[in-house]
Image: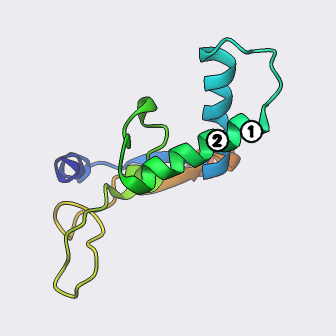
Amino acid sequence: RDFALAGVYQGCETFCVVRHPVDRFVSEFKYKTEFLNGHKDKACDNKEFVDLARFRLAMLKAGKHRYSQDCHYVPQVEYVFGHKTNNKNNKGDVADVQGPQNARPFCQHVLKQESLTDGFNSLMSNF
């Protein structure tokens, strides 16, 4: 699946936007709490946040519910480099991504949300 996508992107210049994982997690928590649960005026509940963080991290470590919640808990590295496999290469190390070893990352240009305007403008100046 990932190698097919990487093949499509081989002939393209691509970019993606990443953000600090904690900021990303907090944003999803706020969205879930404020908008989906209807608690827009509710103050942030530390216990609720810690409980959710522990639950989500345990699920990720166990390999469960990886793609639930609109993929908001999928590590961003997968969007850039593809999904890690459990296959061993001939050195005994875990292979980095599915698909051909010579495949380029999905995103050749990784922009950080914290400096998105400057990063995007710099990237566009190259085209």
Q: What secondary structure is marked by label 1? A: helix
Using the image, tell me which numbered label, if any, was put on residue 67: none
Neighbourhood count class around disc 1 (C-alpha, 10 Å): few under 14, some 14–19, many 20 upward: few
Could you tell me if the residues under marks 2 and 1 are in contact, i.e. CB atoms within 8 Å? Answer: yes
On the question of residue 124 being in view, the answer is no
Query: Judging from the image, what secondary structure is the residue with disc 2 in?
Result: helix
CA neighbours of label 2 inside 10 A, class few (<14), some (14 to 19), many (20+): few
Could you tell me residue 31's position as x and y percent? 63, 25
> Badge 1 is on which residue?
47
**Residue under numbered circle 2:** 51
Residue 1, position in %: x, y?
18, 47
- The residue shown at (64%, 33%) is 29
Figure check: 28 above or below 18: above
Q: Is residue 67 left or right of residue 16?
A: left
Query: Which is nearer the eye, 89 or 51?
Result: 51
At x 25%, y 63%, the residue is 85
The reply, left or right, for residue 25 in relation to residue 63 is right
Query: 98 or 103: nearer the eye?
Result: 98
Find the distance from the CA under tag 2 to the CA under tag 1.
6 Å
On screen, 93 above or below 108?
below
For the residue marked with disc 2, what is the amino acid? Answer: Asp
From the top left corner, tell me how far across and down residue 37 is, in percent.
63, 15
Q: Quadrant of residue 35?
A: top right
User: Residue at the spot x=74%, y=38% of the render?
Assistant: 47
User: Does residue 102 appear in the picture of this structure?
Assistant: yes
